[in-house]
Amino acid sequence: MEARVAACVGCHGAAGRGVENVYFPRLAGKPAGYLYNQ
């Protein structure tokens, strides 16, 4: 799963909390199955 999550870091941040000044929803706290299917 780590390889899949690496593609998300640029927009959603390393902790999955989004980044400032741009709207990308939080991924932190989402179930692993939800993230895997994305």
Image (cartoon, rainbow, N blue to C red):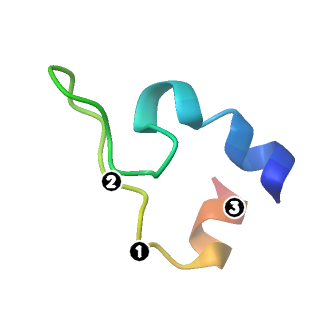
Q: Determine the secondary structure under disc 3.
A: helix
Q: Residue at x 66, y 76 (%)?
A: 33
Image coordinates of residue 38 in percent, x first then y, are: 63, 52
Mark 2 and mark 3 lie on one chain; the one further toward the N terminus is: 2
Q: CA distance from mark 1 to mark 3?
A: 15 Å
Image coordinates of residue 26 in percent, x first then y, are: 32, 53
Question: According to the image, label 2 marks what residue?
Answer: 26
Name the kind of residue labelled 2 in the image: Arg
Residue 37: assigned label: 3
Q: Nearer the viewer, mark 1 or mark 3?
A: 1
Question: According to the image, label 1 marks what residue?
Answer: 29
Q: Pointer 2 and pointer 3: residues touching (CB < 8 Å)?
A: no
The residue positioned farthest toward the top in the image shown: 21
Q: Residue at x 69, y 47 (%)?
A: 5
The residue positioned farthest toward the front in the image shown: 14
From the viewer's perspective, is 21 left or right of 3?
Answer: left
Image coordinates of residue 7 in percent, x first then y, are: 68, 32
Name the kind of residue labelled 3 in the image: Asn
Mark 1 and mark 3 lie on one chain; the one further toward the N terminus is: 1
Image coordinates of residue 37 in percent, x first then y, are: 69, 61
From the viewer's perspective, is 27 left or right of 20?
Answer: right
Q: Pointer 2 and pointer 1: residues touching (CB < 8 Å)?
A: yes
